Each structure stands twice: as C-alpha cells, then as structure tokens.
Amino acid sequence: MYRRVTLSLLALAALAILGCSSAVKHLFTAPTVAFRGVSLASITPLGGRVLVNLIVRNPNPYSLSTSGMTYELFVRDTVGVARGVDTLHRTVGGHDSLLVALPLDVSLRGILAAGNAVVGYGMVPYRLVGTVTADTPIGARTIPFDQKGEFAPVKPR
C-alpha cells in the first residue's frame, strides 16, 4: 500500500513539473534581435566609436523590460572589433519592437579589417553575438542572439 501511494505521488509530481514546463512555453516567447546597421560616432588614432543599431522585437502580448545586454562585433566572422555591456533598462511593448543604439569602442585593428573588406568587396561582413536579459512575468530570461550579414560602409557627409 505504502509503495502504491509513493508511486502515485511521484507520478503526480512528474505531471505537475511537465505541466509547468509546458505552461512556461505558452506564456513566454523569446524576443528576437536583428542588426539594423552601424554608424560612425568618432574616430581617433587608436580606434573609434561606432553605434550599432539593433531592433528588438517582442512577440508576446505583454511588455518586456530588458535589464542588460552583452554583445561582441566581429568582422569577417573572426576579427573581434568590439564588445560591450549595456545595463540600461528598456521596455518593449507587447507585439512591438524597439530600436536600440549600442555604443561600441572599436580597435584600430577592427577598423583596418573593416577597411580591407570594403576595398576588396565593397561591403563589410559582420557577425554580432550576444545576449539580452529580459524581465518577464515568469522571471528573468537570458536570450542569446547570433547575427551574420553585411553592411555598407559609413559614407562621409
């Protein structure tokens, strides 16, 4: 008798855990992050500062707040150009998107790699890797992103 009760309780606990896991999947859909371009903020003999523009899309019916972002920008998939951490709290409305401009200090090596890519190809191949920490109704969630593509160089005004 004791064994049957124990097995029944274990089975109920397993169902409850699976049910909660399933509910979480229906309550929260991870936001997406997409690269939208880069602009030159300043340049120095040792490097420079660029603004990387990202769009964060929230597919959920409720607002999400971001409590942090980490990011690293590569040129030609392997040359680390810049990395950063953003701790500004931002809010993305339900079924909405938000444009985020992240400042990145770029090394001289990164600027030269981007320049060589432009000379040889006309475009700059990039890879942007990072995470967004979203505060959700079911707790904080860290969402990774990994974007690849190309962007046109910044044109002088």
Image (cartoon, rainbow, N blue to C red):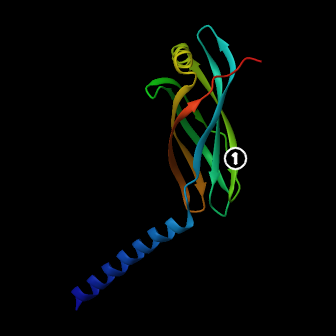
Image x and y of residue 135, in percent: 60, 53
3 or 51: nearer the eye?
51
Residue 43 shown left or right of residue 148 in the figure: right
Q: Quadrant of the N terminus?
A: bottom left
Q: Quadrant of residue 61?
A: bottom right
For the image shown, how many numbered marks are present on the structure? 1
Image x and y of residue 41, in percent: 70, 22
Residue 59 appears in view: yes
Query: For the point 52% across and 30% down, which residue is it?
Result: 126
Q: Residue furthest right?
A: 157
Q: Is residue 119 above or below residue 145?
A: above
Image x and y of residue 91, in percent: 69, 50
Q: Residue furthest bottom?
A: 1
103 or 16: nearer the eye?
103
Query: For the point 55% across and 15% down, which residue is it?
Result: 119
- Which class describes the residues within 10 Å of circle 1: few (<14), some (14-19), or many (20+)? some
Q: Quadrant of the C terminus?
A: top right
Q: Quadrant of residue 63?
A: bottom right
Q: Quadrant of residue 60?
A: bottom right
Q: Is residue 1 above or below residue 60?
A: below
99 or 115: nearer the eye?
115
Disc 1 marks which residue? 98
Image x and y of residue 7, in percent: 26, 83
Residue type pointed to by label 1: Leu
> Which element is circle 1 on?
strand
